[in-house]
Amino acid sequence: MAVEPPALQVLRWDEPPDGPVLVLLDQTRLPAAETELVCTDVPALVRAIQTLAVRGAPLLGIAGAYGVALAAARGYDVDEAAELLEGARPTAVNLGYGVRLAAEAYRTAVEKGGTEGEAAAAALAAARELHRTDAAGSARMARLGLGLLDELLPGGSLRILTHCNTGALVSGGAGTAFAVALAAHRAGRLRQLWVDETRPLLQGSRLTAYEAARNGMPYSLLADNAAGSLFAAGEVDAVLIGADRIAADGSVANKVGSYPLAVLAKYHHVPFVVVAPGTTVDLGSPDGASIEVEQRPGREVTEVTAPPLPGAAAAARMSVAPPGTRAYNPAFDVTPPELVTAIVTEEGVLSPVTGDGLVELCARSRQVTIS
Ligand SMILES: CSC[C@@H](O)[C@@H](O)C(=O)COP(=O)(O)O
């Protein structure tokens, strides 16, 4: 039987004598080094979010909630902190959700006549609750996702292609799409995990391969542009991805490169399954076109960055394009609902994708209404 590795300490709240802090596993340094990044204030956390030291939709929500708790505990203006945190990255709807959840808990405590300390404790309790429910949701998604694969692809071993990183590094638990692949592995059903390297920031090769290796999963890495030939060779049974935002019409925003995989999957009659918590559904975005896609600096494309080795102060960067080259660098793309076989959430599987299903799901999985 496979031995489970120790759980990754991705994010934790700590209270040293000089005041509370949020401690993150610095994902920019993986896989070369497992380094902690200590955030003592909200600007430090905002930098960590923008540089992708902490990343992935569910974890951004959890980090945002703890960020509000940090501001409250250290006596900063909570509304200002919430605005800064929410604006740190635009696409993952979970970030704003987590921030508003904790800010709402803080405000409610103040309105009820609580002290600053009591209101800060309420914000922290909300962050901890979100952390806990995300972990529980992750386990449910893994179970439901594996059940769906059993239905779609009964018997036999599975060759799953995944994109970006959707494992324990993005969640309070085992993650979203990766958690399903891990459940398949633990059930003895995973023959191969195909890991897209995920240019330009290499979340696949740096992070998913790192998690697959830790868990003893059979995996191979491929350059993103090798996916077509892999499908053509009949080597992919299912595509599993996460999501940063799911619009009311079922359009799915996820790491750039997801949409071309959905097109390939449709052409080759391979199920394309999205795994995401209910908090990723945004009924305020009516369709894919209304989702704001984060545009990132062109140098992430014109340069390659190697994660710094232990002890090195900074990443090694090397230019791979002539000086002055402009680049197109959207962080996400949007897959239309007709290319999505199913959406797996902690509340159930939606298949085929319908607006009605999403509305019900949202009502069940949200603790506060997002305006
Ligand atoms: C559940 S993780 C889903 C997504 O957040 C993930 O696939 C992704 O696109 C992350 O992008 P990133 O830019 O690394 O934060």
Image (cartoon, rainbow, N blue to C red):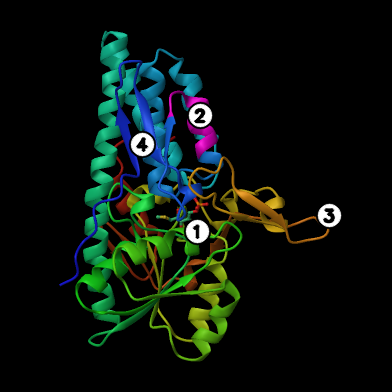
* Quadrant housing the N terminus: bottom left
Cα separation, mark 4 vs mark 2, equals: 28 Å
- Specify few, some or many for label 2: CA neighbours under 10 Å numbering under 14, 14-19, or 20 or more: some
**Residue receiving disc 4:** 369
The answer to whether residue 282 is seen in the rendering is no
SS category of the residue bearing label 1: helix
Cα separation, mark 3 vs mark 4, equals: 48 Å
Cα separation, mark 3 vs mark 2, equals: 31 Å
Please tell me which of labels 1 and 3 falls first in the chain: 1
SS category of the residue bearing label 4: loop
The image quadrant of residue 128 is top left
Q: Nearer the viewer, residue 134 or 35?
A: 35
Mark 1 vs mark 4: give the one in front. 1
Query: Disc 1 residue type?
Result: Gln
Q: Residue at x 31, y 12 (%)?
A: 110
* Tag of residue 323: 3
- Specify few, some or many for label 1: CA neighbours under 10 Å numbering under 14, 14-19, or 20 or more: many
Query: Disc 2 residue type?
Result: Ala
State whether residue 231 is above or below residue 199: below
**Residue receiving disc 2:** 44
Q: Position of residue 173 (x, y in %)?
A: 27, 51
SS category of the residue bearing label 2: helix
State whether residue 106 is above or below residue 174: above
State whether residue 96 is above or below residue 69: below
- Which residues make up the magenta segment? 39-48
**Residue receiving disc 1:** 203
- Specify the farthest residue to the front: 311
Q: Residue at x 69, y 57 (%)?
A: 301
**Mark 1 and 3 residues: CB-CB less than 8 Å, in contact?**
no
